[in-house]
Image: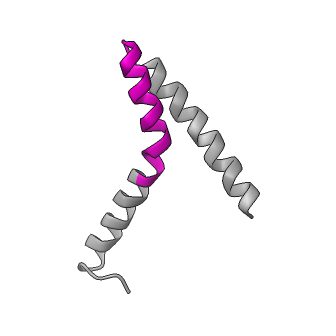
Amino acid sequence: MRNQTCAIYGIAFLGALVYFIQHSTTFWGGVLGFFKAVFWPALVLYKVLELLNYKHGGRFA
């Protein structure tokens, strides 16, 4: 299962990296795009958990 998770993360990372670098207009924008591609899964998970917390009245069961 771990190898499948790593493969999914790797493919998602490469897709995000290509997306963010394509939309950058400067070198430093590309560097920022690299870091965004690395950390975007944590931000997505945070937002999903935040949404679930809101839907359940502010409590995790």
Looking at the image, is 2 positioned above or below residue 6?
below
Residue 33 falls within the magenta-colored stretch: yes
Is 34 or 1 nearer to us in this picture? 34
**In the displayed structure image, the side of residue 21 where residue 46 appears, left or right:** left
Q: Residue at x 61, y 48 (%)?
A: 9
Q: Residue at x 64, y 43 (%)?
A: 10
Q: Main secondary structure of the magenta part?
A: helix
Looking at the image, is 44 positioned above or below residue 37?
below
Quarter of the image for the C terminus: give it: bottom left
**In the displayed structure image, the side of residue 5 where residue 28 appears, left or right:** left
Residue 35, horizontal then vertical, whole percent: 44, 36
**In the displayed structure image, the side of residue 11 where residue 55 appears, left or right:** left
Looking at the image, is 2 positioned above or below residue 59?
above
Magenta segment boundaries in residue numbering: 24-42
State the count of labels: 0
Is 59 or 30 nearer to us in this picture? 30
Q: Residue at x 37, y 12 (%)?
A: 26
